[in-house]
Image: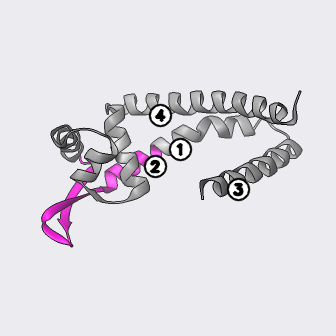
Amino acid sequence: MTKSTQITQPLRAWMDVFMHRSMRGWNQFAKSTGLSMPQFSILMQLHYKGPCGMSEISERFDVSAAAASQLVDKLVQAGYIERTEDPSDRRAKLLKLSTKGAKLVDDGIQERYRWMDELTGQLTAEERGKVAEALTLLTEKAREVDK
């Protein structure tokens, strides 16, 4: 086994399990809220990237302005998103998470990572230390690659 294969096979196996569990958690949580995945994704984008205009939603999700507007309208009606005046253009509106929307996203994030808490609870202190060290190294290297 080459050095590259020695690490890539376990990493790929971990990624497969991680992505499956993570996406399953997102899907189950989104379904439990009654939101579609595109609607929940808009909330997540607002959480991570902050307030934005309707055109940015349309571009980020590669949907028409009408489709973006329809998705956002439902989220506004449900109280998850607020429309505010754009300080740089009074004719435009900014979309931002409401308090209710922020709580929903936080609950979703907690649910998404709940299984990892259960997993790490099964590790010994020594194993947790090894995993933390390896993941910290991988995260640092991945950030360097992204620069």
Against 1, residue 87 (above or below) is below
Spatial distance from mark 1 to mark 3, Cα to Cα? Answer: 24 Å
Which residue is under mark 1?
110
Q: Earlier in the sequence, mark 4 or mark 3?
A: 4
Q: Residue at x 73, y 49 (%)?
A: 138
Q: Quadrant of residue 91?
A: bottom left
Q: Which residues are magenta?
A: 79-107
Q: Position of residue 117 (x, y in %)?
A: 67, 40
In contact (CB < 8 Å): disc 1 and disc 2: yes
In contact (CB < 8 Å): disc 3 and disc 2: no
Q: Residue at x 46, y 41 (%)?
A: 108
Q: Position of residue 57 (x, y in %)?
A: 28, 48
How dense is the environment of label 4, judged by Cα within 10 Å: few (below 14), some, or many (20 and up)?
some
Label 2 is placed on what type of residue? Asp
Quadrant where the C terminus is found in the figure: bottom right
Which residue is under mark 4?
26
Q: Which mark is residue 106?
A: 2
Residue sitting farthest toward the bottom: 87
